[in-house]
Amino acid sequence: MNTYRSEALALRKSGYSYGMISERLGVSKSTLSNWLSGVPFIPGKELIERVGNAKLKSALYKHRLKIESIERAKMYAQSDIKELSERDLFMLGIALYLGEGGKTPESVHIVNSDPRVIRLAMRWFIVCCGIKMEHFRATIHLYPDNDIEKSLHFWCQETSLPANQFNKIITDRRENKSKFNKGKLPHGTFRLYVKSSNNEHSGVHLHRKILAWIDRCLV
């Protein structure tokens, strides 16, 4: 479990709301929901003082309904999907690359801001494409409101990649970027590369093979 997730779990057990945890750790509410949806919630003193008892009772009722709905969805998902076979992973990875992968032959890469998607991509590359961990490289694309050190630590933890496999961090400082996006990507976006290393299994040949898989699926 990564450091942010451990801190979020401790705060949740102490009675902090998702909003309060998000403010403190810089982690989005959607990520917190994925991490903490199954954690029993008893509001702490600070939260009660913020929202008042009446509003809190209504919020807790809605929260309980949400938790119950999420747990039912998880139960149905487990029943519907069961365990992923290697064939399932193979096809899922092709679909993922079609949506999030690089289409030009210069590089094999996938971009996303969700660490679960990146971990899935890594698993696909390793299991279905024969790529080794040392062949991965990463670039983090951040925004002015992101903390560079925290974001690097976050992605190292989430991907198990050492810092020396990360390229220089890119920060987008364009002034015309919408202020409404502030805080929506607490750790920026992550670009996972497969380094060619003059190896046919990880260079241009791999890119051509992936595109051929995609073409075959689209026939």
Image (cartoon, rainbow, N blue to C red):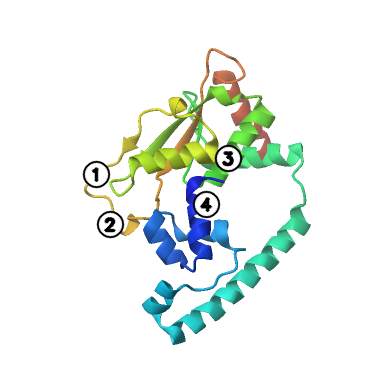
Q: How many other residues sit within 10 Å of disc 3, few (<14), some (14-19) or many (≥20)? A: some
Q: Relative to residue 58, is residue 63 depicted above or below?
A: above
Q: Earlier in the sequence, mark 3 or mark 1?
A: 3
Residue 71 pos. (x, y %):
67, 66
Helix, strand or loop under label 2: helix
Q: Earlier in the sequence, mark 3 or mark 4?
A: 4
On screen, residue 66 versus residue 78, left or right, reads: left
**The residue positioned farthest toward the left in the image shown:** 175
Q: Decide if residue 20 is in sight here.
A: yes
Q: Real-space Cα distance between discs 4 and 2?
A: 30 Å
Q: Earlier in the sequence, mark 2 or mark 1?
A: 1
Q: Real-space Cα distance between discs 4 and 1?
A: 34 Å
Residue 12 pos. (x, y %):
51, 63
Residue at the disc numbered 2:
179
Q: Residue at 55% x, 22% y: name it.
A: 134
Q: Decide if residue 218 is in sight here.
A: no
Q: Which quadrant, please, contains the C terminus?
A: top right
Q: Residue at 52% x, 15% y: name it.
A: 197
Name the amino acid, label 4: Ser
Residue 179 pos. (x, y %):
28, 57
Helix, strand or loop under label 1: loop
Mark closer to the observer (4, 1) = 4
Name the amino acid, label 2: Lys
Residue at the disc numbered 1:
174
Mark closer to the observer (2, 3) = 3
Residue 119, label in figure: 3
Whether tag 2 and tag 1 are in contact, CB under 8 A, the answer is no
Name the amino acid, label 3: Arg
Q: Residue at 51% x, 51% y: name it.
A: 5
Residue at the disc numbered 4:
6
